[in-house]
Image (cartoon, helix red, strand yellow):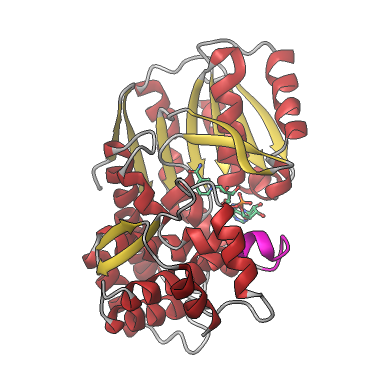
Amino acid sequence: MTTDLIVTTSSGSYPVVVAAGALASLPARLAALGLRGTLWLVSDAAVATAYGTPLADRLQAAGFRVQRHAVPSGEASKSQDQLWRLYDWLLGAGVERRDAVLALGGGVIGDLAGYAAASVLRGIALIQLPTTLLAMVDAAVGGKTGINHPLGKNLIGAFHQPRLVLADTETLASLPRRELCAGWAEVIKHGVIRDAGLFSELEQLAAEQDWGAGGFRGWQSADARLTERLTAIIRRAVAVKVEVVSRDEREQGERITLNYGHTLGHAIEALTDDWALLHGEAVAVGMHAAARIAVAMGLCSAELVARQRRLLQAYGLQVALPHGLDPEAVLAVALRDKKVLAGRIRWVLPTALGSVVVRDDVPEALVRAVLAS
Ligand SMILES: NC(=O)c1ccc[n+]([C@@H]2O[C@H](COP(=O)([O-])OP(=O)(O)OC[C@H]3O[C@@H](n4cnc5c(N)ncnc54)[C@H](O)[C@@H]3O)[C@@H](O)[C@H]2O)c1
């Protein structure tokens, strides 16, 4: 048994549970939170049958009323159309203020269902039940919800903190390896920005395993002891997000450090078509470039870049700019990024493992040189 992680916010605090088999505890936890209204379970088509059905049965057996809705898998579902379908379903079946939305799925479901919960009837309770590694360590914690607009990703949304985040790592067994590896990028990122011990644990695990050139093999190939260790590592990575968002709920300061690797990562993602690179894959490339920029600025050692590169590769990630991608175009998109302040990019750069600084004085020529080499 591990203790819950706790996010503290201006509107109260909420627990974040990371454990194998955690979904079994959901009925008791909802009862403890005093949530006795209807539960509106939103899931992704990929998880609706495998996890949604047993979960709904378990909740009903515990006396809860459950309504269910499945959304097509994929980023395209973070749309006005899918949001409106959720409103039609919720309002059409009589949602009430005391009810709760349960978001069971990856970051797409968490963001979409989270925004529906934030806005329907001016806001009802939200429970995040992440089933991808990325959603566990990043998207489900911190209260950011929203959908995409034709003019850009995540442009419509709201901060709406969940009442509970419950990450059952057993659900990772069905996640495709590529999606898992994309999630490892965020885990490694949390090590670099705040927790050198987490970084070392990841290194040690990789050194002990015989994963070969392709790196991490996937959850399915792991035995019980390994999955237990991976769960502990994931929990440690989630703790980093919990600490950061507790200190900076609305992204006024420290939360920007979570964007390590994202300035160039977002640009690379925007320039490659939807399926070329997953978000975490693009972030891995962005982290490698950011660390090299830090070396060129005299902020950290070349050894950090090498260790980070080896670790990213051990967890199945590439660090080179995808073949054929024009560095000039990447820089141009990065300059347009919404995190640009008064025309300057705010770079999150490592100074040592577990420590970063934010700098807005990185010369464009230096970025260009790093991207081109
Ligand atoms: N709110 C935030 O703070 C925040 C932070 C980071 C990312 N995000 C958002 O998260 C989204 C990406 O999240 P994601 O990577 O989880 O993508 P996703 O939700 O699209 O899930 C990835 C794929 O895995 C499938 N899947 C999910 N769980 C599964 C399981 N257990 N077994 C088998 N298949 C499963 C999904 O159907 C999908 O095809 C983006 O929209 C991004 O903007 C939000």
Residue 47 position within the rendered picture, expressed as x and y whole percent measured from the top left: 64, 47
User: Which picture quadrant has residue 93?
Assistant: top right
Residue 322 position within the rendered picture, expressed as x and y whole percent measured from the top left: 62, 77
- Say left or right for 15 vs 103: left
Residue 180 position within the rendered picture, expressed as x and y whole percent measured from the top left: 52, 64
- Say left or right for 220 vs 87: left
Q: Is residue 190 visible?
A: yes
User: Which picture quadrant has residue 294?
Assistant: bottom left
Q: Can residue 54 be seen in this view?
A: no
> Relative to 6, is 132 above or below?
below
> Relative to 208, is 187 above or below?
above
> Relative to 302, is 53 above or below?
above
> How many labels, in total?
0
Residue at 41% x, 87% y is 210
Bounds of the magenta span?
A: 268-276
Residue 38 position within the rendered picture, expressed as x and y whole percent measured from the top left: 57, 17
Residue at 35% x, 37% y is 252
Viewer-side residue, 130 vs 171: 130
- Say left or right for 32 vs 95: left
Residue at 39% x, 73% y is 293
Viewer-side residue, 255 vs 325: 325
> Relative to 251, is 272 above or below?
below
Residue 349 in the magenta stretch? The answer is: no
Viewer-side residue, 260 vs 181: 260
Residue 271 in the magenta stretch? The answer is: yes
Viewer-side residue, 241 vs 109: 241
